[in-house]
Amino acid sequence: MIYISRQEHFNAAHKLHNPAWSDERNKEVFGPCANANWHGHNYDLIVTVKGLPDPETGFVVDLKALSTLIREHIVDHVDHKNLNLDVPFMAGKLASTENLSMAFWEILQRELPAITTAQLHCVKIYETPRNFVEYYGE
């Protein structure tokens, strides 16, 4: 089994806020991430697929095609956006990196068969250089 990854980058704002809670409770749980005026991150997204190389190309996936798919179906929808307000697939969800990774997984799972027979293995999102989420669809 071969694992191959593509990294993309986007910038987005968000606020962690549970509308069922008071402002005080949100600040207590989410700290500065509950800032009423939002805050932003420079995210790195790494998508890993797995499979066997195609005997004709030697590729598990054409990385250019994977990059285009990620940009068209994810990055173009979140880059320089407010995740809470501007991104339809995040509507009604807390804009945590955990929830973002699951939303990205759903999109990639749906779109990937158009470019490869490889399977989606992992969606990794770096919110900061020290904080990241890995989701394996489980």
Image (tube, rainbow, N blue to C red):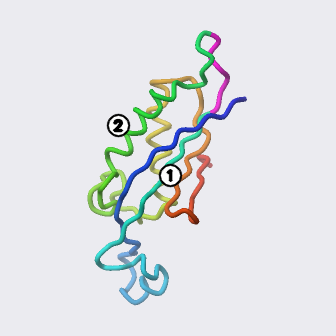
Work out whether 58 lies above or below 1: above
Magenta span: 50-55
Q: Residue at position x 57%, y 58% from top? A: 133
Q: Position of residue 104 (x, y in %)?
A: 46, 47
Q: Residues within 10 Å of mark 1 (few under 14, many from 20)?
A: some
**Of all residues shown, which one is farthest toward the bottom?**
24
Q: Residue at position x 37%, y 45% from top? A: 75
Q: At label 1, which amino acid type do we have?
A: Met
Q: Is residue 81 left or right of residue 49?
A: left
Is 94 colored magenta in this rendering?
no
Residue nearer the viewer, 85 or 64 = 64
Q: Quadrant of the N terminus?
A: top right
Q: Position of residue 29 (x, y in %)?
A: 49, 82
Main SS of the magenta part reads loop
Residue nearer the viewer, 17 or 115 = 115
Instruction: Name the N-terminal-most of marks 1 and 2.
Output: 2
Say which residue label 2 marks: 72
Q: At label 2, which amino acid type do we have?
A: Glu
Say which residue label 1 marks: 102
Q: Is residue 51 left or right of residue 39?
A: right
Which element is circle 1 on? helix
Q: Is residue 70 left or right of residue 85?
A: right
